[in-house]
Image (cartoon, helix red, strand yellow):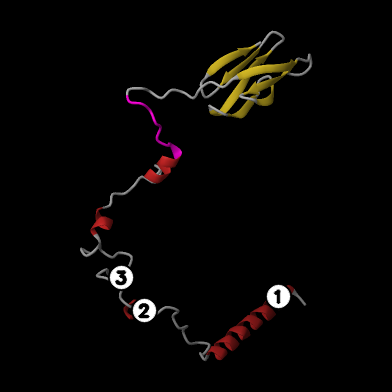
Amino acid sequence: MRPQQRVLLWCIVCVTGVIAGAALLGQAADAPPEPLLPPPEALPAPPGNATAGPLAEPSEAAPPDEAARPLRDPTQPGPELREILVPPQAVAQGTVAGPPPMPQVALKGRVILRQRPGTALLEVDGTLISVRDGADATVAASRAGLLTLHVLEISASAVRVEVLPQKQEIVLR
């Protein structure tokens, strides 16, 4: 069978299916299809004094709190979310809340190789972590919350670490 014959046969099958489907639904094949939705006049009126349609004018019977409510900036968190993100801090009157307290950091050991960056074993508020030269490590400290330690240098004489929330550099020997 040639491609033109296949296309012709497919068209005949489709037209026959449409005619058979229309006959089953009780419509003539040439009759216009019945609308799926009734005309707008036949739809029931919406509740209240509002008019139907997308261009309906606001009615004067609308609740006053809906009409007078100002629009809120969608990029700013609401009051409930703001309380979760920034909980109120109990600060005495006349004092300023400072940065979180500095954790206790101790050098437990270090390994220095010629071909690879050095490695140090640090203890941060009782938690042991292994860090490499130039790497960052995030630790959950008991008093200060989450801390990010950036290792500046590991040498034979000292280990220099920057504590990022406080932006303080400490030297461990």
- What's the distance in space between the residues labelled 2 and 3, CA to CA? 13 Å
How far across and how far down the image is residue 54, in percent?
33, 65
Q: Quadrant of the N terminus?
A: bottom right
Residue plotted at (68% across, 25% down): 128
Question: Going by the image, does 140 lie left or right of 79?
Answer: right
Residue plotted at (57% across, 90% down): 24
Kindly state the secondary structure of the residue where label 3 is placed. Answer: loop
Residue type of the residue flagged with mark 1:
Gln
Residue type of the residue flagged with mark 2:
Pro
- The residue that disc 3 covers is 52
13 or 92, which is in the foreground? 92
Kindly state the secondary structure of the residue where label 1 is placed. Answer: helix
127 or 17, which is in the foreground? 127
Sequence order check: which comes first, mark 2 or mark 3? 2
Position of 64 relative to 150 (above/below): below
Residue plotted at (52% across, 24% down): 165
- The residue that disc 1 covers is 4
Q: Around disc 3, counting alpha carbons within 10 Å, would you say few (fewer than 14), some (14 to 19), or many (20 or more)?
A: some
How far across and how far down the image is residue 42, in percent?
34, 81
Q: Around disc 2, counting alpha carbons within 10 Å, would you say few (fewer than 14), some (14 to 19), or many (20 or more)?
A: few
User: Which residue occupies the extreme left position in the image?
Assistant: 60
Q: Quadrant of residue 56?
A: bottom left
Sequence order check: which comes first, mark 3 or mark 1? 1
Label total for image: 3
- What's the distance in space between the residues labelled 3 and 1, CA to CA? 52 Å
